[in-house]
Structures are given as C-alpha cells and as structure tokens.
Image (tube, rainbow, N blue to C red):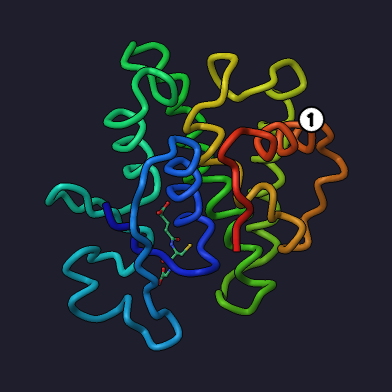
C-alpha cells in the first residue's frame, strides 16, 4: 500500500493515522508541492483534482481522505471503524460530512489563509469553522465519541483540522468538550502526532 501525501497535509495525516491505529503497513510517498508536482503528470493521472491524499492498494487508486478512510476501515478494520450495518454506517458518515464541509471550508481553509498557503475570505471561513465546532461540542458534551460510543473514522476525519484550529486563529477555549475529545483521541493506542 502507498500513501501519497505531503509533510503538512492534515488530510493525508487522517489516512496515516487510521493505518497506524490499525497497525497496517504502508509506504509514504511525499508529493513535492513547492515544485508543483501535484499539478502535473504523472500525479494528475492518479488524482485529477491535484490533491493529496491518494492511496494505492492492490492495483486500486483512490483520492480524497474520506474515500481512503472508508476503504481502509471496511477492508482492514473489520466492524470496528465503519460498521456494515446501514444505520450505524449512516451515523458515522454524518461526521464525515461535517469534516468535508464546516471543517474543511472553515477550519482547514482559515488555517491555510493564516499560514499564507491559501487565499480566500477569512471571516466567512471562520464563521463556518465555529459553526462546525459548535456542532462537535454539542455532541461531545453528552458523548465521548462522535458516533456509536466508540472511536470511528468519523472521529478521525474531524480530528486533525479541529485540533489545529488555533493555527488559524480560532480558539478552542469556548469548546471544552472538543478539548476533552482531542485528548481521548491522542490517548488511543497507535496514535502518533502529525509532523
Ligand atoms: N476533500 C479532500 C481535500 C484534500 C485537500 O484539501 N488536500 C490538500 C492538502 S491537505 C491539497 O492537496 N491541496 C492542494 C490543492 O488543492 O491544490 C480530502 O479530504 O482529501
């Protein structure tokens, strides 16, 4: 298995984190973003969106962190990280939806703007990001995990850019339940810190 990513990609890190929690071996391929490797062939043959992460496994190529998490969880994680029961699967996928909307276009993008690697409207992103944090905090005030009472790929998808929100000047102080959840994720066996 090969994971195409960059050193600082929170989306690539989601995939690496699940593989680490599952103790599944893989090879990391660093894509040279500063030299625009992701915008040219052969990389765009792997992902026409010019983005990391990309996963290659047994001749299959998948782009998007969520697609990679779903694939790995179902293929190598048994029923633990994404159960096959339709209702339970739907519960997990709700949180993936939050990761791909409020968290990506809110927390990921505001962090990118602050770090100078992305242009865009900071205030709009910050508002969306705080909306996402409010939803997470509301859920986590009464639950240790986002779905099913245990860690799932919903937690993994939401974790990296939530934990890094302060790098986008969005404080986690108003979200104590989110802070407790971050600590629980960081205590999971096999967890490793990004970078
Ligand atoms: N929804 C995608 C977002 C992927 C994404 O934003 N990747 C960033 C790195 S973290 C990237 O490759 N950016 C380069 C670009 O968009 O040109 C996912 O979850 O994989």
Residue shown at 71%/46% (left/top)? 130
Query: Is 73 left, or right, of 43 in this rendering?
Result: right
> Which quadrant of the figure shows ligand 1?
bottom left
Give percent across and percent down for residue 66: 39, 43
Residue farthest to the bottom, as pictured: 35
Tell which of 107 and 61 is nearer to you: 61
Choose top left, top right, bottom left or bottom right for residue 39: bottom left
Residue farthest to the left, as pictured: 59
Q: Identify residue for label 1.
A: 177
Give percent across and percent down for residue 35: 39, 88
Question: Which quadrant of the figure contains the C terminus?
Answer: bottom right
CB at mark 1 closer than 8 A to ligand 1? no
Tell which of 19 and 174 is nearer to you: 19
Tell which of 74 and 87 is nearer to you: 74
Query: Is 181 left, or right, of 173 in this rendering?
Result: left
Tell which of 85 and 13 is nearer to you: 13
Choose top left, top right, bottom left or bottom right for residue 43: bottom left
Helix or strand or loop: what does disc 1 sit on?
helix
Give percent across and percent down for residue 101: 50, 45
In the image, residue 69 sits, relative to residue 26, either above or below, namely: above
Residue shown at 33%/11% (left/top)? 85
Residue shown at 56%/39% (left/top)? 190
Residue shown at 39%/80% (left/top)? 32
Q: How many marks?
A: 1
In the image, residue 149 sits, relative to residue 18, either above or below, namely: above
In the image, residue 110 sits, relative to residue 79, either above or below, namely: below
Query: Is 89 left, or right, of 99 in this rendering?
Result: left
In the image, residue 163 sits, relative to residue 10, either above or below, namely: above
């Amino acid at each position: 298995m090969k994971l195409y990513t960059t050193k600082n990609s929170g989306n690539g890190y989601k995939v690496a984190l699940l593989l680490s929690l599952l103790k599944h071996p893989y090879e990391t391929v660093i894509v040279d973003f500063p030299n625009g490797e992701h915008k040219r062939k052969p990389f765009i043959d792997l992902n026409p969106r010019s983005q990391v992460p990309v996963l290659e496994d047994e001749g299959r190529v998948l782009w998007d962190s969520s697609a990679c998490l779903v694939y790995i969880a179902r293929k190598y994680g048994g029923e633990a990280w994404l159960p096959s029961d339709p209702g339970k699967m739907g519960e997990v996928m709700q949180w993936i939806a939050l990761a791909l909307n409020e968290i990506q276009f809110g927390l990921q993008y505001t962090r990118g703007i602050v770090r100078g690697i992305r242009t865009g409207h900071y205030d709009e992103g910050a508002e969306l990001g705080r909306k996402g944090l409010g939803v997470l905090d509301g859920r986590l005030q009464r639950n240790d995990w986002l779905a099913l009472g245990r860690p799932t790929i919903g937690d993994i998808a939401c974790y990296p850019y939530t934990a890094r929100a302060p790098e986008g000047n969005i404080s986690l102080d108003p979200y104590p339940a989110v802070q407790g959840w971050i600590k629980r994720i960081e205590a999971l066996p096999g967890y490793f810190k990004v970078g």
